[in-house]
Image (cartoon, rainbow, N blue to C red):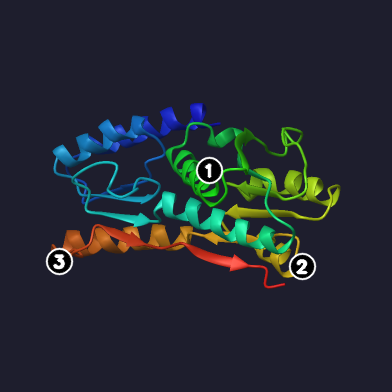
């Protein structure tokens, strides 16, 4: 869970940030507790690239070389629009749930996604019941099933099995979408079980961070824009 791995992540980054011989560091910014450690890196003259989580209109920490990732609020808003449009075809949307897995509690990216998802649904139709719940394979009973239900998952590894079991046992008019692509998510899209996956291209984020820091270290060159956006790419069930 986040309360276990985040302190260790902070400890390791703090260790690296005190080594002024480093040519660069890249890291995610899962919550605001990481920000002082990253600021220490920058103050010590170590170039920093943030990836995945850590940008929503502006970098979470000023002075980073680049952020490689997606704008979480834009992705949450787009997910709401896709789900609302799909359910309009199936008789209307009545309920929208942003499902959080236990390891994601307190993560900045999930909070930003869920907040924008909820705000966009309320803007599209004030009568839609929007909620944010703990829902994963260990907590599969937290969602009350109704027709016109949209479930937005944040991690298929922890949530997809529970969501599919709920969908299989439920009436028509339920759509499930998820963040983060896996081989299984694309298989389920092809079968029509999953409505969409939001692909942030996580592997590309890591590769780009290394390339950017290498160019900065050896050529003292970097790109003009702070944000290098790798998503949002929607894989959609076309049926």
Q: Which mark is residue 219?
A: 3
Q: Nearer the viewer, mark 3 or mark 2?
A: 2
> Helix or strand or loop: what does disc 2 sit on?
helix
Q: Which mark is residue 235?
A: none
Place of residue 125 in the rendered image (x, y in percent of width and height, measured from the top left): 57, 49
For disc 2, the marked residue is 191
Place of residue 155 in the rendered image (x, y in percent of width and height, measured from the top left): 60, 47
Q: Relative to residue 131, is residue 207 depicted above or below?
A: below
Where is residue 68, by image quadrant? bottom left
Place of residue 235 in the rendered image (x, y in percent of width and height, measured from the top left): 59, 67
Place of residue 212 in the rendered image (x, y in percent of width and height, measured from the top left): 27, 62
Q: Relative to residue 220, is residue 11 depicted above or below?
A: above
Q: CA distance from mark 3 to mark 2?
A: 48 Å
> Are the residues flagged by discs 2 and 1 in contact, CB closer than 8 Å?
no
Q: CA distance from mark 1 to mark 3?
A: 45 Å
Q: CA distance from mark 2 to mark 1?
A: 28 Å
> Helix or strand or loop: what does disc 3 sit on?
helix
Q: Earlier in the sequence, mark 3 or mark 2?
A: 2
Circle 2 Cα neighbour tier, 10 Å, few/some/many (<14 / 14–19 / ≥20) = few
Q: Relative to residue 76, is residue 5 depicted above or below?
A: above
Q: In which quadrant is the C terminus drawn?
A: bottom right
Q: Earlier in the sequence, mark 2 or mark 1?
A: 1
- In screen coordinates, is 139 left or right of 54? right
For disc 1, the marked residue is 118
Circle 1 Cα neighbour tier, 10 Å, few/some/many (<14 / 14–19 / ≥20) = many
Please report the residue visible at 77 percent of the width from the left and 67 percent of the height from the top: 191
- In screen coordinates, is 67 left or right of 77? left
Circle 3 Cα neighbour tier, 10 Å, few/some/many (<14 / 14–19 / ≥20) = few
Please report the residue visible at 66 percent of the width from the left and 43 percent of the height from the top: 158
Q: Nearer the viewer, mark 1 or mark 3?
A: 1
- In screen coordinates, is 193 left or right of 44? right
Please report the residue visible at 56 percent of the width from the left and 31 percent of the height from the top: 1
């Amino acid at each position: 869970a986040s309360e276990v791995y985040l302190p260790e992540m902070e400890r390791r980054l703090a260790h690296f940030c005190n080594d002024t011989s480093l040519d660069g560091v890249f890291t995610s910014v899962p919550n605001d507790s990481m920000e002082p450690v990253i600021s220490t890196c920058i103050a010590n003259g170590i170039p920093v690239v943030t990836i995945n989580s850590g940008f929503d209109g502006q970098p979470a920490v000023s002075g980073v070389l680049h952020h490689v990732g997606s704008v979480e609020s834009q992705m949450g808003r787009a997910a709401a629009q896709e789900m609302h449009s799909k359910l309009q075809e199936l008789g209307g949307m009545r309920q929208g749930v942003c499902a959080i897995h236990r390891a994601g509690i307190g993560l900045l990216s999930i909070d930003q996604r869920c907040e924008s998802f909820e705000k966009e649904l309320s803007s599209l139709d004030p009568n839609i019941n929007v909620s944010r719940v703990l829902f994963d394979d260990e907590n599969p009973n937290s969602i009350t099933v109704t027709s016109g239900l949209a479930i937005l998952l944040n991690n298929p590894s922890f949530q997809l099995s529970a969501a599919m079991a709920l969908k299989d046992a439920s009436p028509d008019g339920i759509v499930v979408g998820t963040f983060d692509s896996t081989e299984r998510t694309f298989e389920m899209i092809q079968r029509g079980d999953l409505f969409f996956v939001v692909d942030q291209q996580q592997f590309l984020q890591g590769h780009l961070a290394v390339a950017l820091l290498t160019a900065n270290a050896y050529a003292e060159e970097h790109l003009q824009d702070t944000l290098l956006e790798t998503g949002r790419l929607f894989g959609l069930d076309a049926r």
